[in-house]
Amino acid sequence: MASSIRIGLLDADSDVRFGRRLVLSSSPKFEVVFESDGSVSDLEAIEQSLIDVLVIDQKLSSGPGIDFYSNLRSLVGVKQAPTAILTSSFHQSGLLVDALGQGFVDLVSLEQGASGLVDRVLQVVSGSHIRSLLDLKQLIDAQPPVIQVDLSFVRLVDELPEKIASNLRRLKSVWASVDSSKIEKYDLSSLNDAVARLPVANSTELIMTMSRSGLLDVK
Amino acid sequence: MIRWIQQRNWLPEVSLAAFVFLLLGGLDLLTQGPMAMLGSLAIAASLLFVRKLSFLAPALVLAASLVQVSFSLLPIFGSIGIPLLAFVVGAFSPKPWREVNFAVTIFGGLVFAANVGFNPTINLAIFGGVVQLDDLGRTVIFLTLSLLAISLISLMWILGQLLITRLVHIGTDFDRLVYEDKQLKLSIELAEQSKRFEIARDINETVVQKLASVITNAEGGIYAAKANPEAGFRALEKVLVSAKGAHSELRRLFDMINRGTAVSTTPPTLEDLEALAISMREKGLDVAVSNFGERFALDQSAELAIYRIIFEALQNVRQHNPRGTKATVEISWLENGLQVMIKDNGVEIERRAQLGPNGLPVPYEAKDDLDTLLEKVTGPGLTAMRERAESFGGSLEVQRVVGIGFTVSAMFPATSISTDLSTA
């Protein structure tokens, strides 16, 4: 029998946590092993709870959920931090972009309902949650352009071996393409080697970080 | 003063022209006779047309000049009116007549200078001098006086413009005080609104949070109830608590947004009309409410709409009529519907307060009857009342009753407002 998915629930509101726990606990596939309002002291406890998926609400007692996850990644390491889904009351494209850029795999709003959350957790565990490159491009293009160059990230990209660097160059040329079918067909798994070498959790975060640092701009 | 002038059409001009004519024309009549007075009359009359029919003003100045030259008059006292005309033109004439009139007043000044300089009847002997003026002397006098006339008229014209600019665009000290007071009140109001907005934002956040709790618990309950009914029950309890919390937050928001206006926990009904009448009486409007016919049960929202119509109508009566006005609210419960009539006697009270030449109140005339027939009573408040009535299939009419006041009449079909018939 496959072991259940260990879930951590973080939300400033205990009633909301109660409801989410009821939803997730109703399925034998899930086990809620950690639950908290997201205070700073939770960071170490999360590290020790062997959590598979963290469901973090944007509203935590210590501040925004995105910042909490960022602190957690700083503490335990980008690769070691559990996969996280951000939740919020309403869907906001800007928040989704920020979340993806900070390593969250997705944003689930209250409007998507409990089934939306359950489905997303299952997709994350099965690895079928990855967005297409076209989705990401449309998402980024719809936002006001933000340039936040991470110099250490840029240096690491410059130092990548030629084979991986050529993959990134191909990504850049596809990104600049006006042919949307070409962008849609792009296989994000070709970035796995780059993801493994760079301080990002997944290919989505890699693209978001490259976009923020101006590495996807056409020159 | 400036507003008094701006708000009246002819009175300021007529007053000024009359003053100039009586004073200067009188002097001319006494010193040189009727022809000189005619010249003064033309200059005084030009003051009448500074703001309106401005093209007549220069024509009259030219006519005055013609009179002086044609009849070889000595300089007339009316010429003193020319600098005054330049001042008024600078202040009140519209473009381009401001410039045209300025040029013509300069011409009038030059005519005056020429009249002094070259008039053969003028020489130093008439002032007791012994030296006869030759052509050069007369030219020098003409040039000197021309220069003085041009300077004086230009100065007055500029002063006129300066005055109007200052009064209209800068305002008086009193205007500034009023403006500052208004600005202060607006600042306070804005600060209050801003504070309210902040509180509203906080409350909104809390409500969103409470509703998030309601939704997640309801969903959790649905999921859990299948496996464990006890858990579903607990979720329901939490839903209830959160929903109540959201409701009380919304109530706070409602109270805060409606601060300053009366807030009641339940919408008012027609039973509350007596209380409304008492409250109106306290505010100075004598209101009497009467019902005719057999009452039937009303739909709650229809009853609120009818109450609102009566309330608005009474508010209108109170705002637009003098103290002592009486209003009656008559509600007729008919077999097929409901009729509401709100009558007032505001016009009658106002007429009684105005006494005619015979010491009796002013009677109404045939013109009032005609006005009543032709006049369509309109206004945003009436439109809102009419829309309320129409939203329940009803209609609303407002009519002036000659010499008495106004009557608002609303009619509702029973099928749209009665719970008995609408549920049948």
Image (spheres, coloured by chain):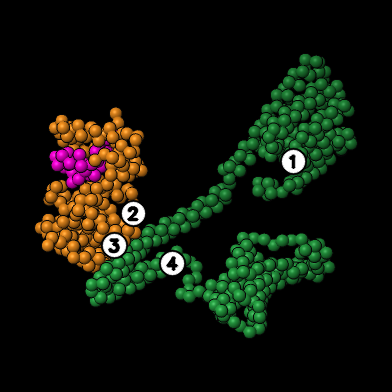
Chain colours: A orange, B green
Residue topped by disc 1:
B52
Q: Main secondary structure of the magenta part?
A: helix
Q: Residue at x 20, y 42 (%)?
A: A189
Q: Secondary structure at mark 2?
A: loop
Ranked by sequence position, the earlier of labels 2 and 3 is 2
Distance in Å between CA atoms under marks 2 and 3: 14 Å
Distance in Å between CA atoms under marks 1 and 2: 65 Å
Q: State the image coordinates of residue B15 (x, y, percent, origin top left).
A: 76, 46
Q: Amino acid at mark 2?
A: His
Q: Residues within 10 Å of mark 4 (few under 14, many from 20)?
A: few
Can residue B62 be seen in this snapshot?
yes
Please identify the quadrant where the C terminus of chain B is shown. Answer: bottom right
Which of labels 4 and 2 is toward the front?
2
Q: State the image coordinates of residue B369 (x, y, percent, origin top left).
A: 80, 65
B286 vs B370, nearest the viewer = B370
Q: Residue at x 80, y 67 (%)?
A: B364
Horizontal side, residue A127 vs residue B58: left or right: left
Q: Residue at x 80, y 32 (%)?
A: B59
Count of numbered circles in the view:
4
Q: Are marks 2 and 3 on the same chain?
A: yes
Q: Amino acid at mark 1?
A: Lys
The question of residue B44 being in magenta is answered with no
Q: Label 3 lies in what chain? A: A
Q: Secondary structure at mark 4?
A: helix
Residue topped by disc 2:
A91
Distance in Å between CA atoms under marks 3 and 4: 31 Å
Q: Amino acid at mark 3?
A: Ala
State which region is magenta: A188-217
Distance in Å between CA atoms under marks 4 and 1: 55 Å
Q: Residues within 10 Å of mark 2 (few under 14, many from 20)?
A: some
Horizontal side, residue B2 vs residue B357: left or right: left
Residue topped by disc 3:
A114
